[in-house]
Image (cartoon, rainbow, N blue to C red):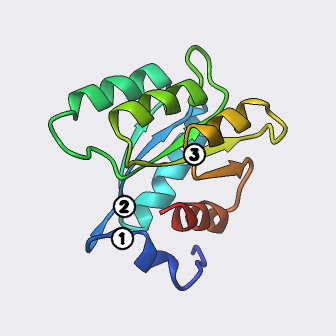
Amino acid sequence: MVTMHPMVDSVLERAGDLMRILVVDDNVELAENVAELLEDEGHAITVAFSADQALLLLKEGADRTPCFDAALLDVRMDGMDGVELLGHLRRCCPSMTCVMMTAFSRDERLDTARELGARRVLAKPFAPDALLSALCDAA
């Protein structure tokens, strides 16, 4: 069972509805674990295993505004990285809350991610509470 800060549930709700969260990570196991944790908390989760796949999902959901309330983005991925994806998200979904995930805490791209509007950077590996707290703080 996940132990959470008592305020996490209420903060992670948007206008009475749980959040629609996009998880983007090329580490399939990690992405699926994050999705499972957030689904267990009642959130609607969509997983993409690359930035290109995430952009396709956003294009498909363009008729829904916003299509996602938040995104969890891995910084380092093959092909387009999470920081470049964040730039695209800022242009098409400026109100989306974005949290970056990385195993490389001294990555120079983190400064760029913050400049582009990443609300938090979550260091991998992380505990379930840290993930929920990062979303809570960023919301």
How many tags in the picture?
3
Residue 13 position (above or below residue 10): above
Query: Residue 130 location, x and y as percent?
Result: 66, 64
Q: Mark 2 points at which residue?
A: 43
Please give the label number shown on residue 118. Answer: 3
Residue drawn at 60 percent across, 68 percent down:
133
Amino acid type of disc 3?
Ala
Viewer-proximal residue, 86 or 78?
86
Amino acid type of disc 2?
His
What whole-number distance in Å separates the C-alpha atoms at marks 3 and 1?
19 Å
Give SS at disc 3. Answer: loop
Image-based side of 1 in relation to 46, left or right: right
Q: Mark 1 points at which residue?
A: 13
Density class for disc 2 (Cα within 10 Å; few <14, some 14-19, many ≥20) is some
Density class for disc 1 (Cα within 10 Å; few <14, some 14-19, many ≥20) is some
Do the CB atoms of the residues marked 2 and 3 lie less than 8 Å apart? no
Query: Residue 36 location, x and y as percent?
Result: 47, 54
Sequence-wise first label, 2 or 1: 1
* Tag in front: 2 or 1: 1
